Amino acid sequence: MTHSLPVLPALSRRAVLLGGGAAALSPWLPRARATPAEPKATTLSAAPGRAALLGDDAAETAIWGYDGHVPGPQIRIRQGEALQVVVENRLDQDTTVHWHGIRLPNAMDGVPGLTQAPIRPGERFTYAFAPPDAGTFWYHPHAHSLEQLGRGLAGVLIVEEAEPVPVDRDLVWMLADWRLTRDGRIAAGFGNGMEAAMAGRVGNLVTLNGTIPTGQPVRAGERVRLRLVNAAVARIMALRFEGHHPVVVAVDGQPCDPHEPEGGRLLLGPAMRLDIVVDMQGEAGKRYRVIDDFYDGLSYPLTTLAYESGPPLRAQPPDTPLRLPPNPLPKPDLATAECHELTLEGGMMGGGTMMGMGGMHGMGGGAAWTINGSSMTGDGNAGMPPLFTLRRGRTCVLTIRNRTAWWHPMHIHGFSFRMLSRNGVSVPHRPWSDTVLFAPKDTVECAFVADTPGDWMLHCHVMDHQMAGLMTVLRVA
Ligand code: C2O
Ligand code: CU
Ligand code: CU
């Protein structure tokens, strides 16, 4: 069976227009404020709405969104500040909100049946926590995850550094992937078993901040911090910035050694984030393409950097350092670590056979994948015991082996992994991340300190894979 990724004609043909009223630019945003003592309170309602996914000239698409919008409201707080969010469910099915990448108390983690009761239609739930780490995070449902995320429920949560970072502008690109019908509606058929055993529900329209990209206005000479968020249910992206040299300064919200990505490609699996700094050293009036070339033979121009015609903001890139201040992550103690192995198996092979487990028959309930031989399916409410229990405060070294023929962005709740090695080779910069992208057959070693008690999910963030069994629970007690 061949798997094609049609790109809507509208995506490839559309002329790239420079938005009219580009915001005024000022060197170094002065953003000093006092830290308020009160928690920052807000509300979010998960609700049906309409969105101009195909642009302002096309018909709107019926979506599900936070406050009825795609993406949901951008929540910004400052490191150390407390956040309180009252979530109201205006859908006609259960929901929850998961705060992806945030280290928080288990009861605030948003997993139905594991950390809280689902929020029923018409009901509310209050989330309250104080994120310890500055960075780029996001929020999304953890009930009916494939369909709710696939219909648009997702938003960005930014925790600003205690001291403002010296850049001219701080931009967010929330990338989402939609499968639309010819008449621009969200295609039905969530949870197709064949797709679940393959690459998942990859769509045919990629939006940037909720609409078809029309070009990012930039000014020559400015330094931009760009927060890339892949909120797709299944699409992996590899972005290249023509004529530019982005520097990665944070991975999954966590600051890293500033570095240019390998081969100039920014690899972003579902749920992953990269903060990059781009010095806009292109020519005024010109446009430079940003290309996604992850899938062989299916590269497409995602958007452009569209330079305004005015004089450059400065002649040379600024020489201020790019390194972000560190977050207070507990340091793994490898000498006393407890070691565990996770083996991922399943999925389709060439020729339509299942891999490793004696075929589909071996697994019930729509499962297509296993971790250490078992499949926790759905949204984490399978009533399965934890895979293992870690003593609180202990360092855990995980060796995760992908024995499948597919890519998997493996995500842990409540912690950040310190990457140690991939396929036996020590990982450069040893970044922290909460979502690690596995190529077929990859083996990754990573470590974390099990400092927060509770039952924590670990799963693939290709939503069809999660629903079809690529999920487990770790207990910290
Ligand atoms: Cu963003 Cu359990 O996931
Ligand atoms: Cu998460
Ligand atoms: Cu997967």
Image: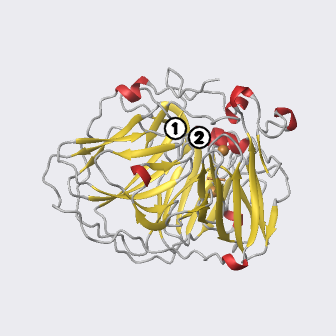
Tag 1's secondary structure? strand
Query: Is disc 2 in contact with disc 1, using a CB cutoff of under 8 Å?
Result: yes
Q: Quadrant of ligand 2?
A: bottom right
Which quadrant holds the N terminus?
top right
Looking at the rendered structure, the secondary structure element under dot 2 is: loop
Q: Mark 2 Cα within 10 Å, few/some/many (few <14, many 20+)?
A: many
Residue that label 1 marks: 177
Q: Is 310 left, or right, of 207 in this rendering?
A: left
The amino acid at mark 2 is Ala
**Mark 2 vs mark 1: in front:** 2
* Alpha carbon separation for disc pair 2 and 1: 8 Å
Q: Nearer the viewer, residue 309 or 354?
A: 354
Is residue 117 visible to us here?
Answer: no
Q: Would you say residue 286 is visible in this rendering? A: yes
Indicate the position of residue 397 as horizontal and vertical percent values. Answer: 70, 68
Image-quadrant location for residue 146: top right
Depth check: 57 or 257 in front? 257
- Residue 392 is situated, as x and y percent measured from the top left of the image, at 75, 76
**Residue at far front of view:** 424
Image-based side of 92 in relation to 139, left or right: right
| Residue type marked 1 | Asp
Q: Residue at x 36, y 71 (%)?
A: 164
The residue that mark 2 highlights is: 234
- Position of 209 with respect to 309 (left or right) is right
